[in-house]
Image (cartoon, grey):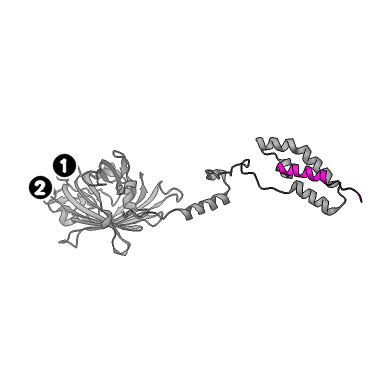
């Protein structure tokens, strides 16, 4: 019988196995002391492998290889510590879109539900809240000039009955102007500025405004194109947002604000063309989506014998209701001025705008105005007419 050579390779195999060697360990040494031991024992393992290959019996050769290369349990004293997975602090720019979406979805799913604060928020896109800065997020700095009423120039303003001889019960009739034309121009400039913020009440602001409106006989060359009338109106307005708990109304409506103020309006002319009045007012506003409704009541103090137009409110009214509609790029408003005791008088005015360039809605806009009734200007407070104006908005900011 041929003598087996197994003892030597098996001894070498056991020696290599006792060092924790494996093919991976030989190919990729672990840093540190373990790597040093593996590198030192590599010749022994190589020699054991050669001796295993010398076996002619397959069973003995397989047993030899198993003894050399079988994986062994790591030594707890020398095994590396388990790595702690660090949190993912990579930014979206470091991840692919798919990774970003998946990670964000996981985070949203794991996030706790939002805690309700019980505070009602203004409706998204609230025009009234943005314009009058009713919410905390709407607040902008004080003493910044902004537009108020529409600023426009209507070079074509056609009236059904031009007032060639204005009249007032205390100032009498003015001289006749036979050359006045039914076609003239109309222009308006209106600005506002917030002068105090959080005044007396939370989120309540005090505003100062100025509006100037002119009727210009620009097509009347016989009289050298004079300004027929210009009205000047400075105003102080106190705006109070409605508390959140009271703002929600049935039908999707929101009660948005209260206002109180003082206004003076005059045309700066001498008698018998002088017209003026002072008024205190209180108002409120409601909103539903693209529709806003504002109401205002005017109270005129008595002025005695100095009154240029004591019957003014009997013609132009003491109450104003305005509905504004913002359907996309167009804007429209309908204003009704009335007096409860003189329902046959008052006036109705329609204003409509649309951008000249639909890509720039904040730029120039077409402006159309239709008026019917009394008081299109102070000089015409007791003169009834119907007029149509066409032009452009000048600016808005």
Looking at the picture, tell me which residue is in the foreground, 192 or 256. Answer: 256
What residue appears at the point 28 percent right and 50 percent down from the top-left corner?
181
Mark seen at residue 270: 1
SS of the residue under disc 2: loop
Which x, y percent locates residue 112? Answer: 43, 54
Identify the secondary structure beneath mark 1: loop
Residue 367 visible in the displayed image: yes
| Residue carrying label 2 | 303
Residues at circles 1 and 2 in contact by the CB criterion of under 8 Å:
no
Classify 10 Å Cα crowding around label 2: few (below 14), some (14-19), many (20 and above): few
Q: Is residue 335 visible?
A: no
Q: Is residue 11 magenta?
A: yes
Q: Main secondary structure of the magenta part?
A: helix
Point out which mark residue 252 bears.
none
| Foreground of the two, 178 or 92 | 92
| Residue 371 occupies quadrant | bottom left
Q: Is residue 325 left or right of residue 380?
A: right
> Residue 46, image x and y in percent?
80, 40
Between the C-alphas of marks 1 and 2, the distance is 17 Å
Between 221 and 163, which is closer to the camera in this rendering? 163
User: Hey, which residue is sitting farthest bottom in the picture?
Assistant: 251
In this rendering, position of residue 1 left or right of residue 266:
right
Disc on the earlier residue, 1 or 2: 1
Instruction: Find residue 217 and report its horizontal and vertical position in percent.
Output: 28, 46
The picture places residue 22, in percent across and down from the top left corner, at 73, 44
Depth check, mark 1 against mark 2: the one in front is 2
Q: Is residue 151 magenta?
A: no
Q: Which residues are magenta?
A: 1-20
Quadrant location of the C terminus? top left
């Amino acid at each position: 019988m041929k003598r087996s050579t197994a003892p030597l390779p098996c001894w070498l195999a056991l020696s290599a196995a006792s060092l924790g060697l494996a093919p991976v360990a030989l190919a990729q040494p672990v840093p540190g002391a373990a790597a040093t031991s593996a590198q030192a024992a590599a010749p022994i393992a190589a020699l054991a492998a050669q001796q295993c290959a010398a076996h002619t019996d397959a069973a003995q050769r397989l047993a030899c290889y198993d003894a050399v290369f079988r994986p062994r349990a790591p030594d707890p004293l020398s095994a590396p510590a388990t790595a702690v997975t660090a949190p993912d602090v990579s930014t979206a720019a470091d991840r692919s879109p798919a990774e970003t979406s998946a990670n964000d979805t996981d985070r949203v799913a794991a996030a706790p539900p939002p805690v309700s604060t019980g505070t009602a928020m203004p409706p998204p896109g609230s025009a009234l809240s943005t314009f009058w800065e009713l919410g905390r997020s709407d607040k902008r700095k004080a003493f910044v000039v902004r537009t108020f009423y529409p600023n426009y120039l209507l070079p074509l303003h056609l009236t059904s009955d031009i007032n060639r001889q204005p009249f007032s019960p205390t100032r009498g009739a003015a001289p006749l102007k036979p050359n006045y034309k039914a076609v003239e121009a109309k222009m308006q400039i209106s600005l506002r500025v917030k002068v105090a913020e959080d005044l007396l009440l939370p989120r309540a602001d005090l505003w100062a405004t100025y509006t100037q409106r002119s009727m210009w006989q620009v097509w009347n060359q016989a009289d050298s194109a004079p300004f027929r009338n210009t009205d000047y109106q400075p105003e102080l307005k106190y705006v109070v947002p409605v508390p959140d708990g009271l703002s929600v109304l049935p039908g999707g409506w929101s009660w948005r604000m209260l206002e109180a103020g003082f206004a003076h309006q005059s045309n700066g002319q001498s008698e018998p063309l002088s017209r003026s009045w002072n008024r205190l007012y209180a108002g409120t506003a409601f909103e539903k989506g693209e529709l806003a409704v504002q109401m205002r009541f005017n109270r005129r103090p008595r002025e005695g014998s100095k009154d240029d137009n004591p019957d003014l409110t009997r013609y132009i009214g003491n109450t104003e209701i305005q509905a504004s509609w913002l359907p996309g790029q167009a804007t429209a408003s309908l204003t009704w001025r009335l007096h409860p005791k003189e329902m046959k008088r008052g006036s109705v005015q329609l204003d409509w705008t649309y951008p000249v360039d639909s890509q720039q809605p904040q730029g120039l806009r077409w402006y159309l105005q239709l008026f019917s009734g009394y008081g299109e200007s102070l000089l015409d407070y007791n003169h009834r007419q119907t007029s149509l104006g066409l032009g452009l908005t000048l600016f808005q900011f």
